[in-house]
Amino acid sequence: MEALQARFGLRIAARLSEGSRELPHDISERLKASRELALERARLARRVEAATSTQVSGSGPTATLSLGGGSKSDWWLKLASALPMAALVAGFLFIAHAHTRQQIAAAAEIDAALLSDDVPPVAYSDPGFVEFLKTPRD
């Protein structure tokens, strides 16, 4: 496949070279500069690709960069993806606990107000209590 691509590229290059002989000098110089720039960019892209595809490893205090998946890196990846979920669950539990404590505090405040009032608690179950509440106090 690569040989076929190389042959095709050579045929196109030959056709372009034949056609460039008929062009004015200034246009041919601009095309030459553009070709050289394109070749330089292609060489640079190959160098960058080669540098990123290699694995860098060292011994001692140097760091190791591995693009392949090992069992140790898989474990860290799983842990790193589970930590946000654990923090979310802990946050929900804290919110539920705080809400429950707030409800208990509100109920305790109401109970304290009822017990410290002049009305005995048995009066709240009396059907005439509503009439008692409607009458103004002196």
Image (tube, rainbow, N blue to C red):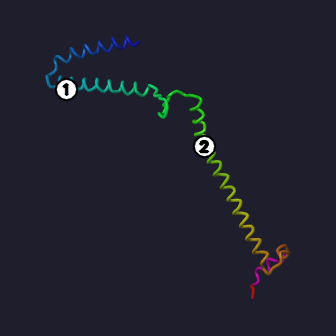
Q: Are marks 2 and 1 in contact (CB under 8 Å)?
A: no
Q: Main secondary structure of the magenta part?
A: helix
Circle 2: element type: helix
Q: Is residue 84 left or right of residue 105?
A: left
The x, y position of residue 11, in whole percent, is 29, 12
For the N terminus, give its image quadrant: top left
Could you say which disc has been placed on residue 30 in the image?
1
In terms of sequence position, does the residue under pointer 2 or pointer 1 come before the other? 1
Indicate yes or no whether the magenta region holds residue 48. Answer: no
Residue at position x 63%, y 52% in the image: 91
Residue at position x 21%, y 14% in the image: 18
Circle 1: element type: helix
Q: Amino acid at mark 1?
A: Arg
53 over 13 or under it: above or below: below
Q: Nearer the viewer, residue 96 or 73?
A: 73
Q: Nearer the viewer, residue 74 or 20?
A: 74
Could you say which disc has been placed on residue 83 in the image?
2
138 over 13 or under it: above or below: below
Q: How many marks?
A: 2
Q: Which residues are magenta?
A: 127-135
Residue at position x 58%, y 31% in the image: 72
Q: Amino acid at mark 2?
A: Leu
The x, y position of residue 104, in whole percent, is 73, 64
The x, y position of residue 32, in whole percent, is 21, 23
Indicate yes or no whether the magenta region holds residue 128. Answer: yes
